[in-house]
Amino acid sequence: MKTRTTRALQSSGAAAVALAALAACGAGGGTEAPAGQSASFEGRGPITYAAGKDPSGVVQPTIDRWNKLHPKEKVTFIQLPTDPDAQRQQMIQNAQTKSDAYTVLSLDAVWTSEFAAHRWIDRLPADGFPLQKMLKPIVETGKYRGGLYALPWTSDGGMLYYRTDLLKKAGIDKPPATWVQMKSDCAKVKKLPEAKGMSCYAGQFQKYEGLTVNFAEAVNSAGGVVTDAKGKPHVDSPQAKKGLDFLVGSLKDGTIPKDAVTYQEEDGRRAFQAGKLIFERNWPYMYPLASKKDGSSKIVGKFSAAPLPGLSGPGASSLGGHNVALSASAKNKATAIDFMKFFTSAENQRLTLASAPAAPTYEALYKDPKLVEQYPYLPILKQSILHAVPRPRVFEYGDVTAAIQRETYAAMTGSKSTDQALKDLQKDLQRQPAAD
């Protein structure tokens, strides 16, 4: 929903996807791959890895380690644009022309259904990967119609960042678990001299993919769903209204500052680090950045992370992340499978975590005492991922996310009531075909 991490790794969950139904559009794909059919993986030699630009600097060193061990099967890193939509479009063009230029693809977690349904990627041998050692919700993002089409590389879950120093001084001994508690805690903290001029809470409320994520989290955290497992919309429910009412009401009563309707991930992070916010919803990439002792953060040692709050208890994050998949038109697929195993291994994810705040996929890494000491947010992040909810499972995801953004933003900025916005959104989403 990048979405970050890959938002600082460049957008984990922030990618928009247009999952076009084959029967509806017939574009570049042929018919759907049968659930029981796998490709044959033959051929060894040089391959490529196609992904967005890597500002974290972790991808090339990983490829270099592979190339040193496999001089006759070298991998070339093809860096696509930073923008997820542009990445996806280039991968689709490559697939539609049946080019072998891209071998292994880095896919946003919500792209699996589209790429698998169009046969742009091969079904993978599930028994050839250590999936049982990974967190189940993450593994599910790589599946389509019972088959494995993408191998998890990184995940992502939203967390509530909060000022430990201010809560403690206000007599609050633990972070809020509900929206009501969060607002009550804010009121207490804002009475402190140190909190003068601070705002209570912010997330990502600009009209982009982050708004879809925050809306979905509000609905899920109120006990509702945007769409069910088959893509059928349910935003006309009382739970969805409670979720949207929380966002709209919080903006009206000042819990959310007015300028937060312009916030993406980095805007909220900078505001929190500058001491302008008591609470902030963001991804794990923010934790090490807010902990830097180079003068860029005013809150070093004064904050922590907790699960997102909800209506009556802890809320539910949207599930982000990136997976790797094998292009159906690629050559040297035996090499590609081995590289995918290497690239996504627990050892490489441990090394990646040391350089960039990507959420690992292996459960053991969240329990490692040394890693938890170095990255104290890991247990909370694991909890966030285990309770996370995928973004809507629909073919025309680009149209769906645009509709969510449009109606949510209209409600938050006052041009529509929450009732009208949800009514209009339900109609829009009912026009979209489901993913299964």
Image (tube, helix red, strand yellow):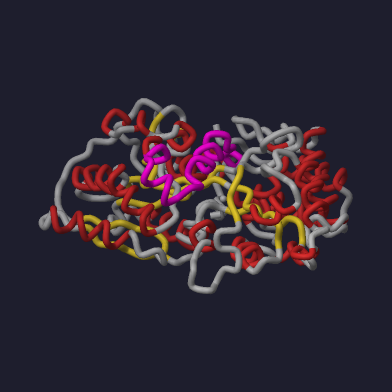
Q: Is residue 49 left or right of residue 427?
A: left
Q: Nearer the viewer, residue 364 or 331?
A: 364
Query: Can residue 31 be seen?
Result: no
Placement of 181 over or under 270, stated as above or below: above
Placement of 23 over or under 196, stated as above or below: above
Placement of 8 over or under 305, stated as above or below: below
Write down the region rendered in magenta.
Answer: 365-393
Placement of 123 over or under 18, stated as above or below: above
Check residue 378 for magenta coloring: yes
Q: Is residue 102 left or right of residue 308?
A: left
Residue in the image at 46% along x and 38% along y: 138
Residue at the extreme bottom of the image, as rendered: 295
Query: Can residue 366 be seen?
Result: yes
Residue in the image at 73% along x and 55% along y: 201
Residue 218 lies, in percent from the top left, at 72, 43
Residue in the image at 17% along x and 58% along y: 67
Number of marks in the rendered image: 0
Check residue 432 for magenta coloring: no
Rendered-image quadrant of the C terminus: top right
Q: Is residue 383 left or right of residue 344?
A: right
Residue 71 lies, in percent from the top left, at 11, 57
Residue 18 lies, in percent from the top left, at 56, 50
Q: Quadrant of residue 92?
A: bottom left
Q: Nearer the viewer, residue 202 or 146?
A: 202
Residue 298 lies, in percent from the top left, at 60, 68
